[in-house]
Amino acid sequence: MISKAEIKRIRALHDKKQRQQCGVFLVEGEKMVAEALASGFEVEAVYRTEDIGQEAMERISQLSSPSPALAVVRMPEVPDAGEIASLIASRPLCLALDCVRDPGNLGTIVRIADWFGIDAIFASQDTVEIFNPKAVQATMGAIFRRKVIYCDLPAVAERFTAAGMPVYGTFLDGKDIYREDLCSSGLIVMGSESNGIGREMAAKVTSRLYIPPYPRENSGSESLNVAIATAITCALFRR
């Protein structure tokens, strides 16, 4: 069974402030809970409908149609300066998200990064929280395999440049990505859904890229969804 106090505590975790204070987040769905249990993350508790009942599950669930399993998972430790320095020294291929606000997009990007073996995802402080329920669900378990590191993005970009690696960014006035030589290491910057890459971060980009439409004179959609653009870009880097 589940106590009223437990229900109250879990419901409180629907709020970002409470998640941050407690250092835990919620995972829902049989597959997601299985992924959590198989990962190196600390799982504090698992609740199943067969154990606590449908009414209790509906009260603690964040979903409109509650799944049969929910877990409370401890957030991983934030990488320190030394770990970030070691990561950059390994000459990785990483993503940088500049003010991505939609949790569904963020979760999908983490899933894309997992698929294409992107080493890490750096995110600006104004990017949506990765432990947002919609973001967690959209990762489809990739949250347990790919780190999202919130940081000072321009400073991180400078460290990639200092290490001799390019900083790529996607822009409408960039060079045709299909015709450019792309390195196997570096930082790929993706901008917000509405404004693209911000001015401060754009100044740190050393190679501006553009995903052209087909045919090239197509005057239909103005731009691509940021998650879709990330998928195309990652695929081309891994080609």
Image (cartoon, rainbow, N blue to C red):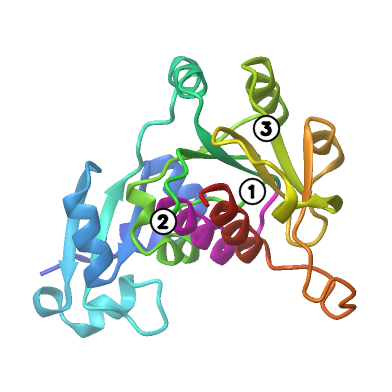
The boundaries of the magenta stretch are 99-114
Which image quadrant is residue 203 in?
Answer: top right
Cα gap from disc 1 to disc 2, whole angstroms: 21 Å
Placement of 61 over or under 34, stated as above or below:
below
Q: Earlier in the sequence, mark 1 or mark 2?
A: 2
Question: 10 Å neighbourhood of mark 1: few (<14), some, or many (≥20)?
Answer: some
Name the residue tied to disc 1. Answer: 127
Placement of 63 over or under 107, stated as above or below:
below
Instruction: Give, as a three-letter code, the residue at label 2.
Output: Trp
Placement of 159 over or under 220, stated as above or below:
above
Residue found 74% across the figure and 44% down from its top: 169
Residue found 40% across the figure and 71% down from its top: 62
Name the residue tied to disc 2. Answer: 115
Residue 71, percent from left and from top: 24, 60
Residue found 28% across the figure and 64% down from its top: 32
Residue 74, percent from left and from top: 30, 44
Secondary structure under badge 3?
Answer: helix
Provide the major secondary structure of the magenta segment: helix
Secondary structure under badge 1?
Answer: loop
Name the residue tied to disc 3. Answer: 153
Is disc 3 in contact with disc 1, using a CB cutoff of under 8 Å? no
